[in-house]
Amino acid sequence: MDHLTVVDEIFLRTHRGMGTPIALQGLWRTREAMEPALLRAIHDRLRHGDLGRRVVDPRVPGARRSWHPTTRAHRLDLLPNTTGADWPTTPLRPATHGDSGAAVGPLSENAILVWADALGTDLDPEFAPGWRLSAARLQDGGTVVAITCSHALADARGLIHAVTAALRSLEPTDSAPAGDMRARTASSEWADAASQWVTIFGGTARALRQRLARPLVRPAARPCADKPEPVSNSGRHLRPVLLTFDATHWDATASALGATPNSLFIHLIATVLWQNGFPNPTITASLPVDTRDEPRVDNDLAMTEIAIQRTDTPATIRDSAKAAYQRRISSPAGLPEEILQVLPDPLAYALSKGAGERDILCSNIGALPDAVRNVGPHQCTRVAARAIHPDITTFPRTQLAGYFSQLDNTYTLAVVSLAAHNDSLSTAIDNACASAGLRPAPW
C-alpha cells in the first residue's frame, strides 16, 4: 500500500485551510499551435498515470492515510475555449481564465502569468481532482501549456517525472493506472498502525531521555534570524516573475566569482530581497534537498537552511550551502516526525507550523530531462517550473521564493514575491542582476 509521508500530510493540511496553499506548476512554450488531439492524449496519459490518485483516510487508529488510484480529472482546459475539434484561430476578445465558456482570444505576452496563476483553483487531492492540464494559444501563434498539481501529490521532481512519463507514451489508453497502488485491507492497516506506534513511542522515549540527560541551563538568546517576528498578512500580495539566462554566461560568471551556479542563484535571491527593502542584516534561506533514490511521483524531499549576511559573496555561500546540504531541519522538539501523522490535524498543524519556512526559499530543480524538450512534433522553446499559491489568505514567513531550472543552454528563474513592497520588485531584480554581472531576458 502506498501511504502518505509526513511531508505529504503537511501539504494536505493546506487544503483543509491550515497554512499557505501551494500548488506546483510546469509551463512549456512552443512556437506553433499545438493540436487539441495531442493535448487530449497527454491529458489521458496523466489521468492514468501516477498523478491519478487521491487520499483515503484510514479506518484503523494510528494507521497512515493512503493513496488510492482514480481516473477522475479536471477536464482539459483549452484557451480560447472551444467546443469543436479544431482550435479557433480568430481572437474574439481579450483572454481571461474562468470564463463562462464563450470563446476568447489568444493570450498576449504579458497575460501568460496572469492566466497561469489562476490555474491552481479547485485542486484537492481528497475530494476533487488534484491536478489540471491547461493550454492557451498565444498571439504570436505559439502555445503555452501548463500542468498544475497540488503539492500534496508531488514535489517538483515528482511532477517532472509524471510529465516525462506522459510525454514518452502519448497513445491514449483505457488501462488501469500505472504504479503498484493496491486496495487497502484491514490487516495491512493494523500492521501499519502497529509500526507507526512502535516508531512513535520508541522515538519519543529517546527524545525524553536525551532531554533529561542534558544539564539544566538557561538557553542563550538566538540570533534574530532564528526568531522571526510574527508574520503579518497586512499589505502582502503575490508578484510572479519569469526570467531566462544564458547558461554558459551564468556558469562563467559563477566560476569567475569562485562560486557554483547554485550558490550564485542563492546569492541572487538574497540580494533581490535586500534590494526590495528587506530591513534585517541577516537573511535565512531555506534550501530543499531531493532525497529520492529513483524517479517517482512523490514528495521525496527534506529541508536545510543557511544564514546569509550582507557581506557574503557567492563564493562564501558555496561553502555554507555545501555544509548545509549534509544536515536537515529537524522535527519538532526532537520528537519522531511520525507523531504528526497520528495527531488530530489542528494539533499536527500547530506542531509543524512554519516548518521549513525561512526568509527566502531557493529551490534548485536542476536540469530537466530530455523528454520535456519536445511535445509530440513540437519543440519547446521555454520550460519553467515553479510554485503558485491559489486563493492565498495566510502568508508564510517566506518573503521571496526562487525556482531555478535548466533546459539545454537556458537557465530559467521563476521568482514569486510574497512581500508587502512588490512595486519595486522589477527594479530590485534588475539591480541584483546588474551587481552580479548577469543578463536576464524575458521568458
Image (spheres, rainbow, N blue to C red):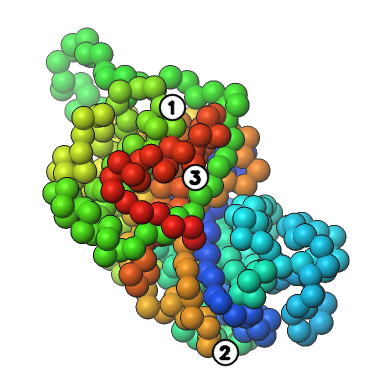
User: What amino acid is labelled 2 in the image?
Assistant: Glu
Would you call the spot at circle 3 few (<14 residues within 10 Å), some (14-19), or many (20 or more)? many
Residue under label 2: 171
Residue under label 3: 416
The quarter of the picture where residue 75 lies is bottom right
Name which of mark 2 and mark 3 comes first in the sequence.
2
Q: State the residue in front, 204 or 421.
A: 421
Residue 277 has which mark?
1
Name which of mark 3 and mark 1 comes first in the sequence.
1
User: What amino acid is labelled 3 in the image?
Assistant: Val
Q: Is there CB contact under 8 Å for labels 2 and 3? A: no
Q: Disc 2 vs disc 1: which is toward the camera?
A: 1
Q: Residue at x 68, y 63 (%)?
A: 107
Q: Residue at x 77, y 60 (%)?
A: 94
Q: Is residue 132 above or below residue 283?
A: below
Q: Secondary structure at mark 3?
A: strand
Q: Secondary structure at mark 1?
A: loop
Q: Residue 160: x percent and y percent? A: 44, 67
- Spatial separation of the CA atoms under disc 2 and disc 1: 51 Å
The quarter of the picture where residue 287 lies is top left
Q: Is residue 62 visible?
A: no
- Spatial separation of the CA atoms under disc 2 and disc 3: 36 Å
Would you call the spot at circle 1 few (<14 residues within 10 Å), some (14-19), or many (20 or more)? some
Q: Residue at x 54, y 71 (%)?
A: 29
Q: Is residue 191 above or below residue 105?
A: above
